[in-house]
Image (cartoon, coloured by chain):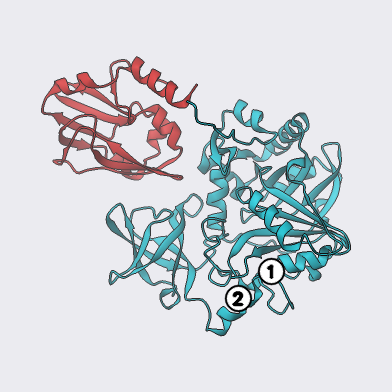
Amino acid sequence: MAYPADYRYTKEHEWIKLDGNIGTVGITDYAQNSLGDIVFVDLPKVGDTVEASKSFGSVESVKAVSDLFAPVTGKVTAINEELKDAPEKINTDANTTWLLKVELADAKQVDGLLSAADYEKFTSEETGH
Amino acid sequence: MSELQIPLRKTALNAVHRAAKSKMVDFGGWDMPVDCCGLIAEHMAVRTAVGVFDVSHMGDIQLRGPGSLAAVQQLCMNDASKLAVGQAHYSAMLYPNGTFVDDVIVHKLSDNDYLIVINAGTREKDVEWVRKTIGHMPGVHVNDFSDYYTQLAIQGPRAAETLQKLTSTDLSTIKNYWFTWGQVCGLHNVMIARTGYTGEDGFEIYIPSDEPTSARVWGEVLAAGAEFGILACGLGARNTLRLEAGMALYGHEISDTINVLEAGLGRYAKLDKPEFVGREALLKVQAEGGPGRKLVGLEMTERGIGRDGYTVFSVEGKRLGEITSGSPSPFLKKNIAMAYVPVDYAVIDTEVAVEIRGQMVKAKFVPLPFYKRAKKSA
């Protein structure tokens, strides 16, 4: 599985890519693979505030529903409207299929998140492989 | 860690599933594939072509001897005296209060020999129940055959064509819910049953449970179905397929707290049989005007998926009951569920609401099953 080196990761399997003070958020390849066929994504609205480590929505596969957790605190500036009708895009390419963009109050927040190497280590321990 | 861990049970195909990188889960103490190559693709393969499932975790109890019919009759609610040799039927073992020990398929192997196929998760409990209930009866031996067979389910509209390549038995001579013995993949005396749990035409074959034989036959089935686009399927697709077909699953639609009449399976309970465990309780329910709640089909009419355990409300906000199974339907492309609700409310097209993570999401009652395959003419 591929984890881009310039992204940061959470233990709840979200990624964030920072561009200035705008963070683009998605779920990891590991997450989409564990979930299986994704059929529904429930996202907040533009203008809503998300809070680090708190649930901001959910993603459902045929089998299960999982909460989505915000990697950072900030205001939602965009959501990926495409996912309403094509949530399965996340299965095809989790690394480029973003869920939402967040304006960070403080860009330093991402410093506390996992690096790609740390995340890969974390997931390999979780699966016991 | 010092905690003692019970290792998961494995079917003879475990190494094959792992090598194929199927997603494995703990299913009732068994290490089973839930998803082999994508649940939706697997589901659609079974609806439109063919798929193969490893269902070796299921249990098989044989009742043998001159008293075997009497034993089956006492143990199971359907009327096994109506079965011909080579015929099978859906039935259930009940507790005296009319609730389910398990639902089963009874096969009549010969006049003195019945095979009862039981669920994996209830296996120990079932075997114990059988021994306790009929073990004292004269002329019957109870044998637990569960570990001796690898059981494969080949399901879908191209299932017959697929399996026909591997056997000299003319499969067109086997009617639905009948079985025979034949040569499959060079193995002698393989039981070939035209049964399944997907709503499609299909076969279940019983082969010896040694690993090389199981792996070889699994591979040959996949090769035989390759031209039709066969897929290896996991328990995830098995669940969505049976849900579309409105089939009950133990621990969901049926359990030791739900009786046969509530579950809508009364037609399989032959109350005119003089005796079977649970009969008195069902007669009493009937005499008292029938069950108070009923299993219904539910279709979400707003965005949202009703899952197992979610609560169903009337439009006035009255709590009606709970969803027993709920999922997106890959074939119908709707979000469907089954739920128990008071009989007074169980009217087709009634609008209701399902509470999904704190939100009321609209749904309506629809007829069961959600999906029924078109019967071939002759």
Of B366 and B85, the residue lying toward us: B85
Q: Which residue is mark 2?
A: B282
Q: Position of residue A5 (x, y in %)?
A: 32, 15
Q: Amino acid at mark 2?
A: Leu
Frontmost residue, B100 versus B179: B100
Residue type pointed to by label 1:
Met
* Real-space Cα separation, disc 2 to disc 1, in angstroms: 10 Å
Quadrant (top left, top right, bottom left, bottom right) of the C terminus of chain B: bottom right
Q: Colour of chain A?
A: red
State the mark number for residue B163.
none
Q: Looking at the image, do the residues carrying marks 2 and 1 touch, with CB atoms under 8 Å apart?
A: yes
Residue under mark 1: which chain is it in? B
Residue B22 location, quadrant: top right
* Marked residue nearer the N-terminal end (2 or 1): 1
Label for residue B77? 1
Apparent colour of chain B:
cyan
